[in-house]
């Protein structure tokens, strides 16, 4: 299934939407569309997928028989004037005294070596598939985390731009009143300082936003001149979800879905099959020989057959067999280690997710709306001189701080959800 998804051309085709006022190079994706482009275009994925094809080629190669060996020899390039033997009938034409020898040899693998080697390479193929899945899994969490950060910075930019516009509107109004002598210039300077601080914060946010976009463009293999945004906002559907996740069920799921767990299991199988190959190597292979000799023996035309094999007197492959046995023990320990690490990672990821979820659930659903409405009320009261600038700016700072807390808590929840998905090996939280 994964290979069908990946076997696509480098040229991506995805539905995108042109935003009013944006250039043709500006692409607006939702999360699913962005991930589709990523899966189709990412060069690391495309390159790693070739490893599976190479492993398949190794299986094909392991199935073939050794090529036969053909030998043509004992050819005399000239004929002696006075041969010591009677003339022999010509092969063709006048080549009656021509001597020639022909032989053909075929190596026969004994003890099921070829079958065992094919089985070994098939395990290697399965390992390559899981290695690919592991690379894909790592790239996915990196990509999705960057998407979450992109949304975070987009929302943060919108908040600061709106408040900068509001402060600048107050500045325009105050400037005229200060010049007319109706207001203290100190309040104008104080607002101007807030405006500059917002501009400075915006510059920092946009710098972080550009870094995230650069990383995303690299992962999606987009043209350098392209510009894109996500038409997606953080949602609140996770306020009341999955607090009752069963840890044992999650660990079982991780054992089934985590590629490195499957790789470690396959490594145990691989070492067992490798031991079988090494044990088979101590059994000598046979070489079947068929030969034809013309004029080189007591027979004019001699046809003979033979068998050759190594005599296992000095080398019975004991060293390689011992290494293979030790590899089996090593693979067992590594599998236990991988299993233990996975269990700890699932526990940690679930704990962090629950902690972040509880933080979000402490924020009332209508709190952000109340926060926005209260700021409007403070701004109106400040314009009407019902409150002084200290009261207004005090709430203004609290407003921005609370907005950032909400955005950061939501970002953390999204990232913790992705980390839990990563630990379990599948998307249990969408």
Image (spheres, rainbow, N blue to C red):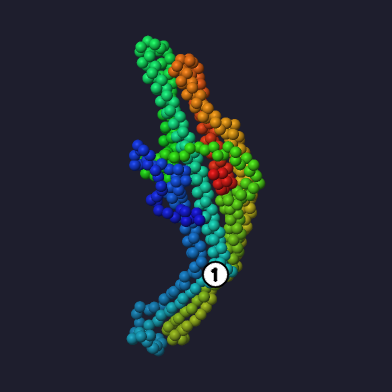
Does residue 427 sit above or below 293 in this rendering?
above
Give 4 or 312, whichever is nearer the viewer.
4
Residue 348 position, x and y percent, is 61, 40
Q: Is residue 91 visible?
A: yes
Residue position marked by numbered label 1 in the rendering: 109
Q: Is residue 416 visible?
A: no
Mark 1 nearby-residue class (10 Å; few <14, some 14–19, many ≥20)? some
- Snapshot quadrant of residue 188: top left
Does residue 326 sit above or below 24 in this rendering?
below
Residue 245 position, x and y percent, is 63, 43
Horizontal relation, residue 261 to residue 403: left or right: right
Does residue 413 sit above or below 137 in this rendering?
above
Give 161 or 209, whichever is nearer the viewer.
161
Give 196 or 108, whichever is nearer the viewer.
196
Q: How many marks?
A: 1
Q: Quadrant of the C terminus?
A: top right
Callout 1: SS: loop
Residue 69 position, x and y percent, is 46, 72
- The residue lying at 47 percent from left, 72 percent from top is 68
- The residue lying at 50 percent from left, 76 percent from top is 289
- The residue lying at 54 percent from left, 67 percent from top is 114
């Amino acid at each position: 299934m994964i290979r069908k998804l990946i076997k696509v051309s480098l040229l991506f085709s995805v539905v995108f939407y042109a935003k009013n006022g944006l250039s043709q190079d500006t692409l607006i994706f939702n999360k699913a569309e962005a991930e589709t482009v990523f899966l189709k275009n990412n060069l690391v994925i495309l390159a790693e997928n070739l490893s599976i094809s190479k492993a398949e080629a190794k299986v094909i190669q392991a199935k073939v028989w050794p090529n036969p060996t053909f030998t043509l020899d004992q050819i005399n390039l000239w004929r002696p004037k006075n041969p010591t033997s009677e003339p022999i009938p010509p092969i063709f034409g006048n080549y009656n005294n021509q001597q020639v020898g022909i032989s053909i040899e075929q190596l026969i693998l004994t003890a099921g070596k070829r079958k065992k080697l094919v089985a070994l390479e098939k395990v290697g193929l399965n390992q390559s598939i899981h290695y690919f899945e592991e690379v894909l899994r790592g790239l996915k969490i990196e990509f999705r985390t960057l998407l979450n950060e992109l949304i975070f910075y987009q929302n943060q930019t919108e908040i600061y731009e709106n408040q900068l516009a509001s402060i600048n509107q107050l500045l325009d109004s105050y400037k005229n009143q200060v010049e007319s002598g109706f207001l203290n210039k100190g309040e104008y300077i104080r607002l101007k300082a807030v405006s500059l601080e917002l501009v400075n914060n915006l510059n920092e946010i946009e710098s972080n936003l550009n870094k995230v976009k650069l990383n995303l463009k690299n992962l999606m293999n987009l043209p350098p001149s392209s510009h894109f945004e996500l038409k997606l906002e953080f949602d609140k559907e996770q306020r009341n979800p999955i607090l009752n996740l069963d840890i044992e069920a999650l660990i079982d799921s991780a054992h089934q879905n985590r590629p490195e767990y499957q790789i470690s299991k396959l490594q145990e199988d691989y070492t067992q099959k490798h031991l079988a190959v090494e044990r088979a190597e101590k059994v000598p292979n046979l070489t079947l020989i068929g030969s034809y000799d013309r004029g080189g023996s007591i027979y004019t035309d001699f046809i003979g057959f033979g068998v050759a094999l190594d005599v296992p007197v000095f080398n019975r492959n004991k060293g390689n067999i011992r290494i293979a046995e030790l590899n089996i023990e090593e693979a067992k320990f590594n599998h236990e280690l991988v299993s233990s690490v996975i269990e700890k990672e699932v526990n940690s990821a679930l704990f962090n997710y629950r902690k972040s979820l509880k933080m979000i659930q402490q924020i009332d659903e209508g709190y952000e709306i109340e926060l926005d409405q209260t700021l409007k009320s403070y701004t109106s009261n400040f314009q009407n001189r019902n409150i002084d600038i200290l009261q207004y700016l005090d709430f203004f700072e609290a407003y921005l701080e609370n907005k950032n807390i909400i955005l950061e808590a939501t970002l953390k929840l999204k990232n913790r959800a992705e980390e839990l998905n990563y630990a379990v090996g599948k998307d249990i939280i969408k």
